[in-house]
Amino acid sequence: MATNPSIITRDTDRIAEKTGNLYESVSIISKRSRQISSKVKEELNNKLAEFASGVDNLEEVFENREQIEISKFYERMPKASSMAIDEFLEDGTYSAYRNTNAEK
């Protein structure tokens, strides 16, 4: 059985180090992951909406190929959770989160 190369073992100590609490770090990453996922889904829907047509015609086959290519592009993108973890570990997410909470 081959392992999926997109599966990465993460160092939980490194994740917890940013906030001092693993669960708070995971919560921040989770919220950011949902934001990324929502943004990507909206982009995909907007691109696919360009192909929406109420009329059947011969060009539909060509447009369908374009839709398939767009969909494949989004399928090959890294998962939102992976993007959020990488962003968090590079100090992108937590510094913004910390600054927002400090103002409250």
Image (cartoon, rainbow, N blue to C red):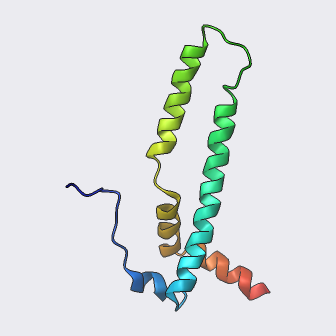
Which residue is pictured at 49% across the width and 30% down the height? 69
Describe residue 41's horizontal placement relative to residue 62 as left or right.
Answer: right
Q: Position of residue 86 (x, y in %)?
A: 47, 67
Q: Position of residue 88 (x, y in %)?
A: 52, 73
Q: Is residue 65 above or below residue 30?
A: above
Quadrant in the picture for residue 93: bottom right
Q: Is residue 72 above or below residue 103?
A: above
Q: Is residue 62 above or below residue 24?
A: above
The reply to whether residue 7 is visible in this rendering is yes
Which of the pair 61/84 is nearer the observer?
61
Quadrant in the picture for residue 32: bottom right
Q: Is residue 37 above or below residue 41?
A: below
Quadrant in the picture for residue 31: bottom right
Which residue is pictured at 61% across the width and 50% down the height? 40
Q: Position of residue 24 (x, y in %)?
A: 57, 84
Which residue is pictured at 53% across the width and 75% down the height? 91
Describe residue 7's horizontal placement relative to residue 41 as left or right.
Answer: left
Describe residue 32's horizontal placement relative to residue 90 as left or right.
Answer: right
